Structures are given as structure tokens and as C-alpha cells.
């Protein structure tokens, strides 16, 4: 009979594998759909990559791959996920505060967006890797504090964006140029509201999935018990917390499907193509492109 610890290990492997498959599918949809290959979704794509690396690292750890390699990569990818969610709020805040809209489009180019995504991974590694210099107990506590700090800062930025949206007022001038800028601003405002609601849901699920892991790490730290000789009940709690954490990576693609129209339509088309169905009626949703000006 499989004991609880072994059952949780199997559950962790299954959830991690499912998270990899669902997020790889998300990468395919983001890459294959023109309406999703825009600056608007740049940091979302970075988030998807993080949600692939984290469960992949967890699977490697389950098959006894060297922990000295797996654990830093795992922690770095989780940090990159959190910073990507934060970057989405910062990016949308800038889109609303930098006027006229053409100025924002000139400043935030695709090249700079790509550089920012790479910088997120570099910063994540710079934050996480030094914690390896401490004991595992201290490292766990530091990573949990860093995680909660990033999530709380992200929540503050999301509140700032929603406040900016609620305070928007159209310009009083009536010239053609101003009216055109206001139309762009209103469109961006509507897009930002929808995107921010989507990633607020992701932020809330991230909080919920991180709380058990952070609680466990704090409990281990203050108990002073060695990780290598922790009793069976702590092994069970550790695997349960890790499984919940990986569930966060698994659920995100379903949130994209639920909230992003282009993502949903692209998946329908992929399914129809896989069935050999070229009937245009299979495109059950009409695309409403949120394309930003090319740079």
C-alpha cells in the first residue's frame, strides 16, 4: 500500500508534468497567434516560460538530479514568475501615465521589452543564487521573505493601476490630434482594465499557492530542525506545499483561456486543425485585436 508521502510525491510529479504540458501549449499559442505576439503580452509570455522552468526543475529534482543545479534554477524561475507579474503592472501603469500614447509606444519598443524580460531572469538569479551561501534553513526563510515582499509590492502596483484607471478623464481640447490621442488612450484604458483583472486573478492564486510553502519554510526555520533529518510529517508537509506551488503553474494557462479571447480562439483553431476540420464555422469567437502600433 502506498503511504501518504509516496502518494504526494506521485501527485507532485503528475501536477508538474501537467503544468509543463499546459504551459508548452500556451507558448505555442502565444508564438503562433499574431494577435498575441505584441508588446501588450510581452511579460505574460515571460511568465509562461517561468511556469515551464519551475515544474521542469521539480521533475528533475524528483528523479534525483543534482540539487546544487536544480534548486537554484527552480527558485530563480519562481522569482522570475513573480517579477513578471509585477512587470505587467508597471508596464500598464506607464502606458496610462505617459502621454500622449505615441510617446509610450516610442519608449517601450519590442527590443526593450525583450531586454526587460531577460533582465527579469538576471535579477531573479542575482536575488536567489546568493542565498545558497547560507544554510538551507536560512535560505528557505530568505526566499519566503523575498517572495512575500515581491507579491506585496505587486499588489500595491496593481492598486495604483486600478486607481489610475478610475481617475482617467478625457482631454478638454477638441482638435483632431487630441481626439485621436484620446481614442487611443480610451482603447488602451479598456485593454488595461481587462488585462489587469486577468492578472489580478493570477496574483491572487499566486498568493494562495505560496502561503502553504512560506508557512512551511517559516515553521522549519523557527523549529531549527535539519532539513536532511526532518521527521516524516514534515516530509509530507513539504511535498504537499510543493504540490500546491506547482498547481499555481498548472492553473495559469486555464486563466489565460478563460480571460484572453485571442488565446481561446487560437486554441479552438488548433483543435480544429488537429481534427482536420477547416470549416471556418469552427472559429466560434470573433477576434478583437488589441494590437499596438508597430515600432
Image: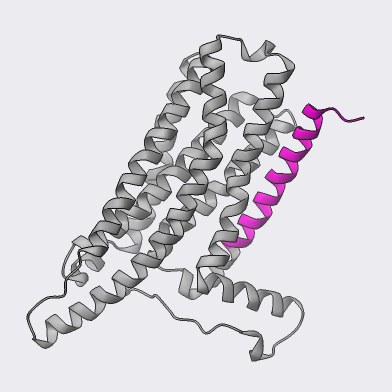
20 vs 207, nearest the viewer = 207
Quadrant housing residue 1: top right
Q: Position of residue 129 (x, y in %)?
A: 46, 27
The colour scheme used here is one colour
Residue at screen point 67% across, 20% down: 234
Q: Position of residue 211 (x, y in %)?
A: 52, 34
Q: Position of residue 250 (x, y in %)?
A: 63, 50
Q: Is residue 90 left or right of residue 74?
A: left
Residue at screen point 70% across, 29% down: 65
Quadrant housing residue 289: bottom left
- Position above or below: 235 against 255: above
Q: Evaluate whether residue 47 shows in this view.
A: yes
89 vs 164, nearest the viewer = 164
Q: Evaluate whether residue 107 shows in this view.
A: no
Quarter containing the C terminus: bottom left
Q: Is residue 271 left or right of residue 162?
A: right
Q: Is residue 231 left or right of residue 44?
A: right
Tell me which segment is drawn in magenta. 1-27
Amino acid at each position: 500500500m502506498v503511504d501518504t508521502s509516496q502518494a504526494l510525491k506521485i501527485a507532485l510529479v503528475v501536477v508538474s508534468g501537467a503544468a509543463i504540458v499546459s504551459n508548452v501549449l500556451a507558448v505555442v499559442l502565444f508564438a503562433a497567434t499574431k494577435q498575441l505576439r505584441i508588446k501588450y503580452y510581452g511579460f505574460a509570455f515571460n511568465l509562461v516560460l517561468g511556469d515551464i522552468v519551475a515544474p521542469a526543475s521539480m521533475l528533475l529534482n524528483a528523479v534525483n538530479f543534482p540539487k546544487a543545479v536544480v534548486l537554484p534554477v527552480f527558485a530563480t524561475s519562481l522569482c522570475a514568475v513573480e517579477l513578471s507579474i509585477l512587470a505587467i503592472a508597471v508596464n500598464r501603469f506607464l502606458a496610462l501615465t505617459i502621454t500622449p500614447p505615441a510617446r509610450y509606444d516610442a519608449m517601450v519598443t519590442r527590443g526593450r521589452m525583450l531586454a526587460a524580460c531577460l533582465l527579469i531572469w538576471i535579477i531573479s538569479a542575482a536575488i536567489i543564487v546568493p542565498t545558497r551561501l547560507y544554510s538551507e534553513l536560512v535560505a528557505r526563510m530568505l526566499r519566503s521573505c523575498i517572495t512575500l515582499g515581491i507579491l506585496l509590492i505587486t499588489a500595491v502596483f496593481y492598486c495604483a493601476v486600478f486607481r489610475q484607471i478610475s481617475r482617467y478623464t478625457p482631454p478638454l481640447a477638441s482638435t483632431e490630434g487630441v481626439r485621436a490621442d484620446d481614442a487611443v488612450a480610451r482603447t488602451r484604458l479598456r485593454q488595461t482594465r481587462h488585462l489587469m483583472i486577468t492578472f489580478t486573478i493570477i496574483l491572487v492564486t499566486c498568493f494562495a499557492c505560496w502561503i502553504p510553502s512560506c508557512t512551511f519554510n517559516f515553521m522549519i526555520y523557527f523549529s531549527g530542525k535539519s532539513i536532511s533529518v526532518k521527521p516524516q510529517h514534515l516530509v509530507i508537509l513539504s511535498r504537499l506545499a510543493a504540490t500546491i506551488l506547482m498547481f499555481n503553474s498548472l492553473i495559469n494557462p486555464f486563466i489565460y483561456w478563460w480571460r484572453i479571447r485571442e488565446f481561446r480562439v487560437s486554441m479552438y483553431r488548433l483543435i480544429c486543425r488537429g481534427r482536420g476540420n477547416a470549416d471556418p464555422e469552427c472559429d466560434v469567437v470573433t477576434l478583437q485585436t488589441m494590437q499596438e502600433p508597430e515600432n
